[in-house]
Image (cartoon, rainbow, N blue to C red):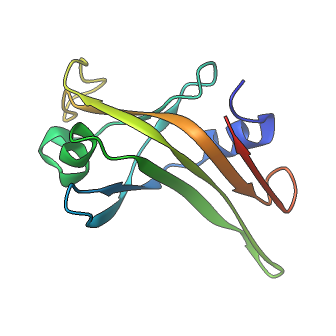
Amino acid sequence: MIFTPAELEYLTTQPIGRLATVSPDGQVQNNPTNFQVDADTGVVSIRGGALETSKKFRNVQRGSTVAFVVDDLATIDPWAPRGIEIRGTAVASTDQEPPRPGMSRGIIRITPTRIVSWNLDGPRTSRSV
């Protein structure tokens, strides 16, 4: 299993994360997006309407590595931020049937190579996978 039980539970309760990609000229691009996690493989899937027309999709097609962050505040009093950063490789393709109306055939699949989490399994954990 790629994710710890606490990380997986957290990811399945969060609706939005932020995907950072890098263009061929070195420009970083970061946008909020929805996602799903395959608990068995650890692959994070990004879907959306017209995803294949987005800069993040084109950056991934051109070989960008990625960082995907999901975070929130468990409470503000006391201050308790928590989250997970998933660094890895990604593949962009247009071979998927849309899961529901309004979604495109485009999909970005992220395979984690490094996971950093905070306040999920303890103060901070960091590991290569």
Q: Does 41 sit left or right of 30 as displayed?
A: right
Q: What is the x, y in percent for residue 63?
A: 28, 41
The image quadrant of residue 95 is: top left
> Going 12% across and 45% down the picture, which residue do you hit?
53
Please determine whether, in this image, residue 32 is positioned above or below residue 9.
below
Q: Does 106 sit left or right of 83 as displayed?
A: left
Image quarter where the N terminus lies is top right
The image quadrant of residue 104 is: top left
Q: Does 10 sit left or right of 57 as displayed?
A: right
> Going 27% across and 26% down the picture, which residue do you hit?
100
Q: What is the x, y in percent for residue 33?
A: 37, 51
Q: What is the x, y in percent for residue 3?
A: 70, 34
Residue positioned most to the left = 53
Please determine whether, in this image, residue 118 is positioned above or below residue 112.
below
> Going 26% across and 64% down the picture, which residue do you hit?
26
Residue positioned most to the front = 25
Q: What is the x, y in percent for residue 41?
A: 59, 21
Residue positioned most to the right = 122
> How many numbered marks does the figure carry?
0
From the viewer's side, name the closer residue of 69 and 50.
Answer: 69
Image quarter where the C terminus lies is top right
